[in-house]
Image (cartoon, rainbow, N blue to C red):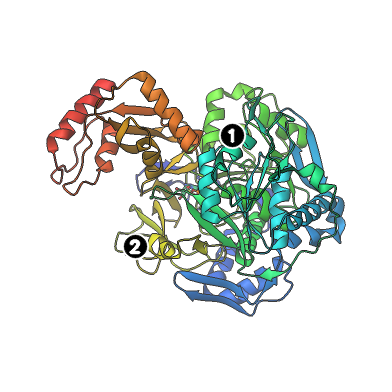
Amino acid sequence: MEETTAGIDSRKSTPSAELVPVFPPSNEFSARAHIGSLEEYRRLYRESLDSPVTFWGRMSAELDWAEPWQQLLSWDLPHARWFVGGKLNASYNCLDRHLAGPRCNKAAIVWEGEPGEVRTLTYRQLHWEVCRWANLLSRSGVGSGDRVVIYLPLIPEAVIAMLACARLGAVHSVVFGGFSGKSIRDRILDCGAKIVITADGGYRRGKIVPLKKRVDDALKDVPMVKRVLVVRRTAEPVPMLAGRDRWIEEELKEVDARSEAKPVDSEHPLYILYTSGTTGKPKGILHTTGGYLLGCALTTKYLFDLKEEDLFWCTADVGWVTGHSYVVYGPLALGASVFLYEGSPDFPQPDRFWRMIERHRINILYTAPTAIRAFMRMGEGWVKPWDLSSLRLLGSVGEPINPEAWLWYHQKIGRGRCPIVDTWWQTETGSAMIAPFPGATPGKPGSATLPFFGVDPAVVDDQGNPVPSGTHGRLVIRRPWPSMLRDIYGSPEALRSTYWSQIPGVYLTGDGARQDEDGYFWITGRTDDVLNIAGHRIGTAEIESALVSHPSVAEAAVVGEPDSEKGEALVAFVTLRQGEAASEELKNELRLHVAEEIGAIARPKEILFTATLPKTRSGKILRRLLKELVRNGQIEGDTTTLEDPAAVTALSKEVGQAA
Ligand code: PRX
């Protein structure tokens, strides 16, 4: 794909009046693509909004339904039910239906462990494993609707565990392996899991991550969990609590591989995944079966232009929504071959990714801008020697991709040939919402471009009025879509108040955006107190409550600071309790404390001890001013509502001295 001045309308000026190059799909790519022109995309997109019953009637045939649905949508804001009356099973759709045809001996998973071992599971083998695991879970007391917490490294067993739950109609809640014991406990208690699946450890940068130990810490005062099933991954000795803990490999000897995938209602819960919001506590986002699976399958097919022979690599961990939708449910529902890698991208050397792409002949790579920027920093020398000619499409997700990173990805990894699919979406949206169709949509570096079928986004002001093109505003979605979240587990009221009522009648994404004159969306990042650190979502309030749980801390306020590699970095302002002295040791101790409370991703980059924090007269900390301070080194904004304006002057001085 060559940069061109033709395409959508030659070089466009964005609202900020920069010139943006346009990258139309190559004729070669378009000729083979599922959607081969912008006109075709526009026609289908219009149909999806104007004639949804016809459109989804056709599209829903992408899945196998045990019983057909009767009604497309029942919408009682904020509660949606999609494909009402339909019955299906996600595990059946991801496995059983592929066994009857030529896919049965096709690789479902090609996995590489960090130490270098490779395992391949065909669809038949994966099905066999999932059936045995389903029987084991069922023998362990797991039934339909029960919650199962999964805390595993990125090994095939993580996928097996998820599909085994889905097979039984049980609800999985995967916890990312980087989260702490305390985070696991909070999630177990919130979702009421009776059973946890973990491993003796996993590999990360040559070291063993002590997963089982963290689960033991998490379960210290949680008698509700009666069973812990443990995968042997590292052979590290780990304590096994008699009566509670069992080795999976031993248990599997007791079960057979005959298991029927039980059809469940289209709206039956499939999983709960915790994500950060603006409160101190992560929210359990609930996704259900039919609409979610269809959203994953269709976006995988059309946005990644998936072909039968592709080896698809989404580098996300299954602990994040990207892993749920594009490691597991989307690609497997389509019978694709999925590549999985357990470890760190720079281990043992910064060329690990490129080595694996050459070795396994990977065709589609879907990763995060943070990773791309890290590779840029490590230098092209690590990429150049490798044969990346198998790649035919590149994806980006998790945070806005800056044009420099986009262009580097395009030139150095895609070698100028591969379309880049920048997908904007969220844990709540279930599947990609705004993204180019690679055979149809001309790319513009930094823009997620145009909406997917059935998605009706708009950029509006605080009252919900659409803003003119080029103007920054809030990104909202104006109608329900099949893979949308159905609930916040345990807090049904929060569903309405968080997403559907601040601007009445529309879904508030929490992101800012602008649209250009071609209708392209440019996402500018969160407008609320949620941060995006290296593509990982984390709430400032969570980190603040972790900080104030330390005995030396009186108050804390956390803000994001622009970071050239991670997108944003965490800066914490901390006031100490009387008698506590600020020191470098205390800073390190607080960083460690946050890592223990939440996980390493939440560790502040900078901690600034300060005598006071700027507050309103009603006692609310004004983060806006702190943000201004870390970004500009001074505060120019309105300080008239402050309880103590002199505090700001003092703070500016302190920050100036610390810098
Ligand atoms: O701010 C947006 C950003 O990530 C947030 C969602 O985070 P999470 O629920 O963890 O899901 C991440 C993976 C889908 C969004 O509110 N975000 C995600 N993708 C993009 C993005 N920002 C800009 N461009 C993207 N492509």
The vertical placement of 181 against 65, above or below, is: above
Instruction: State the residue lying farthest toward the bottom.
Output: 70
Label 2 Cα neighbours within 10 Å, binned few <14 / some 14-19 / many ≥20: some
Q: Earlier in the sequence, mark 2 or mark 1?
A: 1
Residue wearing tag 1: 411
Q: Nearer the viewer, residue 495 or 489?
A: 489
Q: Is residue 68 left or right of residue 16?
A: right
**Residue 230 drawn at (x, y percent):** 71, 41
Residue wearing tag 2: 502
- The reply to whether residue 6 is in sight is no
**Residue 87 drawn at (x, y percent):** 69, 72
Name the secondary structure under disc 1: helix
**Residue 453 drawn at (x, y percent):** 56, 64
Name the secondary structure under disc 2: loop
What separation in Å lies between label 2 and label 1 (alpha carbons)? 42 Å
Residue 291 occupies quadrant: bottom right
2 and 1 marks in contact (CB < 8 Å): no
Question: Which residue is located at x 62 percent, y 47 percent?
Answer: 323
